[in-house]
Amino acid sequence: MSESFRSMLRALPDFPADLPVFDPASAPQDPAELFRSWLDEALAAGVPQPHSFSLATVGADGMPSSRMLILKNLDAEGWHFATSLASRKGRELTQHPLAAMNFFWSALGRQVRVVGPVVELSAEASAADWSERPSTDGTPNPTWQLYALRPVEVEFWQADPGRKHVRHRYSIPAG
């Protein structure tokens, strides 16, 4: 059984043959600019929920935990996402305010990793984000928190049909 499962997994296709070409020499200085461009291309390609990402945090026991979220904004404050302070990720971010994001667009053979410290944004910004949620009935939610990940590393990865994958990494000084 194990060998047939392994064989089945090995036989699955990796990426489409017709992938975009990425030349790191043409990348802008600002990783946010390149991310916006790649997000636009994912939208144009019909990628469902291209603003979704995996967020990894670390618990008090040192064990990592990841889950899918939606990017709320990207500005000078950082890469925004939100959750309840009472949720597992909210508690983990209170204890260890560091996280990693991973965006993955299989149809384009692309992923973007973003790593860095996380800060809580203002109560006003959090309330505004809560009120903009489609399912909100207008009742305030004092546990809702808007966060910003402030990257110290952003890596863009482009798959290549010949398995000569391209990585372009930005290192950003903390501060």
Image (cartoon, helix red, strand yellow):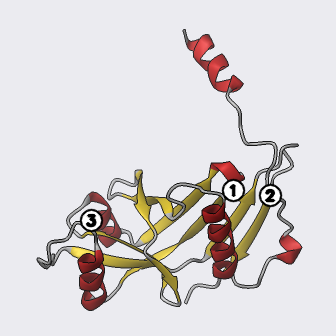
| Labels 2 & 1 near each other (Cβ < 8 A) | yes
Considering only vertical position in the picture, is 117 above or below 90? below
Label 2 sits on a secondary structure element that is: loop
Left or right relative to 146: residue 52: right
How far apart are the alpha carbons under marks 1 and 3?
Answer: 31 Å
Q: Quadrant of residue 85?
A: bottom left
Q: What residue is shown at x 82% (from left), y 49% (from top)?
A: 160
Q: Is residue 112 shown to the viewer in this render? A: no
| Labels 1 & 3 near each other (Cβ < 8 A) | no
* Horizontal and vertical percent position of residue 154: 64, 71
Q: What amino acid type is highlighted by mark number 1?
A: Arg
Q: What amino acid type is highlighted by mark number 2?
A: Pro
Question: Residue at label 3?
Answer: 91
Which labelled disc corresponds to residue 110? 1
How far apart are the alpha carbons under marks 2 and 1?
Answer: 9 Å
Left or right relative to 61: residue 142: left
Numbered label tally: 3
- Nearest to N terminus: mark 2 or mark 1: 2
* Horizontal and vertical percent position of residue 80: 44, 77
